Amino acid sequence: MTEITGDITKKREQRYSYGLMLLRECIEKKRPLTNPNVKERKVLLRAENISIAFGKLQALNNVMVEVKEGEILAIIGPNGAGKTCLLNVISGFYRAQQGDVYMEEKKITHLSSHKIAELGLCRTFQNIALYTGLSVTDNIIAGRHPHIGYNFVTGMIYFPWANKEEAFQRAIAEDIIDFLELEHVRGSVVGMLAYGLRKRVELGRALALEPRILLLDEPMAGMNLDEKEDMARFIIDINEFLKIPIVLIEHDMGVVMDIADRIVVLDFGNKIAEGVPEEIKGNPKVIAAYLGAG
Amino acid sequence: MSININRPCGTFDRNYFQAKEIYRTPLRKILLALLIIGMYLLPFLAGDYGISILTLICAFIIGMLGLQIITGYCGQISIGHAAFMGVGMYTVGILQRHFGLNFWICLPLAGLVPMFIGMMFGVPALRMKGLYLAFATLAAHFVIVYVISNWRSVTNGTDGMWMKRPDAFFGIDFKSDRNYYLLVLTITIIMTYLATNLARSKLGRSFVAVRDNDIAAEVMGINIAYTKIMAFGIGCFFAGISGALGGAYYEYVNIEWFGLDDSIWYLGFLVVGGFGSIFGAIAGATVWKIMDEFSTLVTPLAEIFLGGAAFYASAAFSLVIYSLIIIVFLVLEPRGIAHRWEMVKRSYRLHPFPY
């Protein structure tokens, strides 16, 4: 038993400490954690000229968004501006009528949602979309679905290697539980949890997929100040240690201005501004969109 | 599903293998072993009548596990489950009659043939949900019954056909009911083991994911089409095995044995047992068959109260009892016996304290 446990620990180190390794390397070589020069970063995800209309309502009109390595990109805009619609197009949920989405130069517009998820593009939902009948741990292990190797016959007979694989997945789920400070609820059924915790479980499930890009749809909606601060800390931690670029839709301007590297502003399906928070704050178009042109 | 809830205090997990064990404490392992040994010893105590009830309970547990996988775990309603049992029965019957195959070869085929037919009829589930899907699976029932009753050259139509029990195996003769019960019990235990592991492995989790939130499941990398069709396939595999064992017990197959009402009672007693747990399926099937026997026993008593009218009332008696049980459970305990059992276990664990 100890051998197998040791084996799992070794595997975990190989696989999951790359964030820590990067951190150590940066400290030793006195190199800043992220490349401060935003312009030099590689583009990971590119949505080109996305247009989509529901009947006569033009939900998105020629929107172009780029997500670069290791950045936090916030998408803001008034209600009904098309923010969630853009996320749905990127995650393969809606089909764009025009335009394409590329992930590292690979076209993903035509792929189905689960294929896109397997490529490492993962999202959370505005209204929590957890598997309410499963426990927190099982929810997170369910998020690891594409990374579990055995087939269903092996699972039914529960061969030793399936058992080992399950224990390994459980170990990774426990890592994520540690990271998101969910230890005290790890066994409880998700349907019974409080709202703030459920949001955190959903973030954990998204992390379990080992995403290369994480799309968060209003992760702080309906939370109090403490919970918002916690969530902001987790988002920054994910971005810094795991090097995962994050696309964030959020209405709380304080949070957005504090944690975002870049901001894209949408209004009635059009992109009206893009830039660092300081530029957006002073942009007259953005102010007009939020307060009404006057 | 929940992980740490049903552990007595003082039980600590030292590694992740222990953390996901189903029977964690030695006491529970001993109790399980005693239960299984008791089930094997029961036929030596019970008479022929008891053995026949036990055999049918075991066969129906397998079928109920199949429906639990489709409806309880994956959330796809199926009102054609009894018909898939019928496909299992007729697979064995046809193979024995026309090809003279051994029962041991027929049995896996009795699972695989309904599996493929079930996958075929599971395709509408990709587009439909809830009540609409129920009607689509209803079609499965009528198509299967129509084919069996009209393809006379192969299925002998509505006359039914004889079936043979398995040949002797290492000197054990299955012609006797007691030995046949032991065989059915063994297969039931194996199938329960398979279903339990399915529920806690990769595919089982994706079933629950599709049931609870299919939109999120798709975005989290679960192939919904594959998952739903696998649910129908595996569920019908169980149904087919159940049908084959039940048919071989009577040594006769008939189209009357898997009517539409059977499919509906299947769903009803799954509610009584409890959705989404293996124990629920076992409890549901057991209650169903016990109530079946109970109503036959009670019917003569009705004659005392109703006099001559009892002759007409007796036919409906079992239906009234079934319906009453299902209504009572729907109103008072919609999560079934399984949930009630969890509560009993929890209160036992915390005994002197109320919470």
Image (spheres, grey):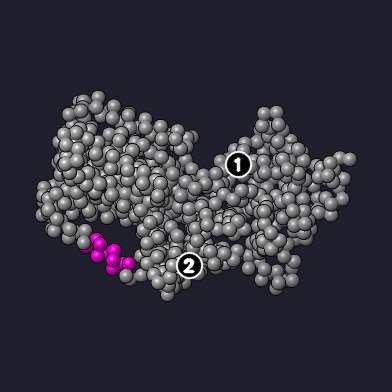
**Crowdedness near tag 1: few (<14), some (14–19) or many (≥20) residues, C-alpha within 10 Å:** many
- Figure quadrant of residue B139: top left
**Residue sitting nearer the eye, B349 or A255:** B349
Q: Is residue A2 left or right of residue A257?
A: left
Mark identifier at residue A8: 2
Identity, as a three-letter code, of the amino acid under mark 2? Ile
Q: Quadrant of the C terminus of chain A?
A: top right
Query: In what element is the residue under mark 1?
Result: loop
- According to the picture, the residue beneath numbered tag 1 turns out to be A92
Q: Label 1 to label 2, Cα distance in Å?
A: 34 Å
Residue B3 included in the magenta stretch of the image: no
Whether B31 is drawn above or below B151: the answer is below
Counting from the top left corner in percent of width and height, residue B110 is at 26, 41
Residue pictured at 62% horizontal, 58% vertical: A196
Counting from the top left corner in percent of width and height, residue B257 is at 23, 36
Identity, as a three-letter code, of the amino acid under mark 1? Gly
Query: In what element is the residue under mark 2?
Result: helix
Residue pictured at 72% horizontal, 56% vertical: A71
Indicate the chain on which mark 1 is placed: A
Residue pictured at 75% horizontal, 47% vertical: A76
Counting from the top left corner in percent of width and height, residue B343 is at 40, 60
Q: Is residue B14 left or right of residue A273?
A: left
**Crowdedness near tag 2: few (<14), some (14–19) or many (≥20) residues, C-alpha within 10 Å:** many
Which of discs 1 and 2 lies nearer the camera? The answer is: 1
Q: Quadrant of the N terminus of chain A?
A: bottom left
Instruction: Identify the magenta region.
Output: B28-37
